Image (spheres, grey):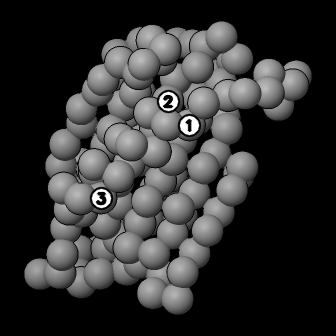
Amino acid sequence: VFTNVVDDSGASLVIELLDFEKELKDPDEVARHFFSDLAEATDSVSYDIDEISCRKGANGDSLVMVNGRHIHDKEGLKWTPLAMGIKRMPQYSTDMVVTLTHGSQSAGGFETSSVLEKNLWLILESIDVKDDSLFL
């Protein structure tokens, strides 16, 4: 994990620099791979994906966004809404994964919002590598 910030409400921002998954070509496949990996790592029972979208970054990087939730119980009553952005950087053999969450919610609680999604696109587009030695 490159950085992990959590506030008093349980909301968090996590930025990870991971080995580039070169066998993943399709944005949908990329999104599902990282979203399910995180669900497994957090011992979630299952996950739901609401939306997957992609864009090209200003310097040609591929940006992928996933909105959904990780489900923590078999009844589906406790879950964590999250938005995940993936910035693919093959030139550095790196996938940057940015995850925004709002702590655990219950059925009928809020979903990831359009404001959250706009903020995540902004974060993905604005992160720029100034020091290549980070990847050596």
Q: Quadrant of residue 75?
A: bottom left
Residue type, label 1: Ile
Q: Residue at x 66, y 11 (%)?
A: 91
Q: Position of residue 24 (x, y in %)?
A: 47, 17
Q: Relative to 52, is 72 on the left or the right? A: right
Residue 122's place in the image compared with 116, above or below, is above
Mark 2 and mark 1 residues within 8 Å of each other at the beta carbon:
yes
Residue at the farthest bottom position: 8
Residue type, label 2: Lys
Image mark for residue 87: 2
Residue 24's place in the image compared with 77, above or below, is above
Image mark for residue 3: none
Image mark for residue 127: 1
Mark 1 surroundings within 10 Å by alpha-carbon count, few (fewer than 14), some (14 through 19), many (20 or more) = few
Image mark for residue 116: 3
Q: Where is residue 107 in the image (x, y as percent from the top left)?
A: 17, 80
Q: Which residue is drawn at 54% across and 41% down?
A: 97
Find numbered disc 3 in the image and state the secondary structure of the residue it sits on: helix
Query: Which is more N-terminal, label 3 or label 2?
Result: 2
Find numbered disc 2 in the image and state the secondary structure of the residue it sits on: strand
Q: Which residue is drawn at 35% across and 60% down?
A: 82
Mark 2 surroundings within 10 Å by alpha-carbon count, few (fewer than 14), some (14 through 19), many (20 or more) = many
Find numbered disc 1 in the image and state the secondary structure of the residue it sits on: loop
Q: Position of residue 15 (x, y in %)?
A: 60, 50
Residue 2's place in the image compared with 100, above or below, is above
Mark 3 surroundings within 10 Å by alpha-carbon count, few (fewer than 14), some (14 through 19), many (20 or more) = some
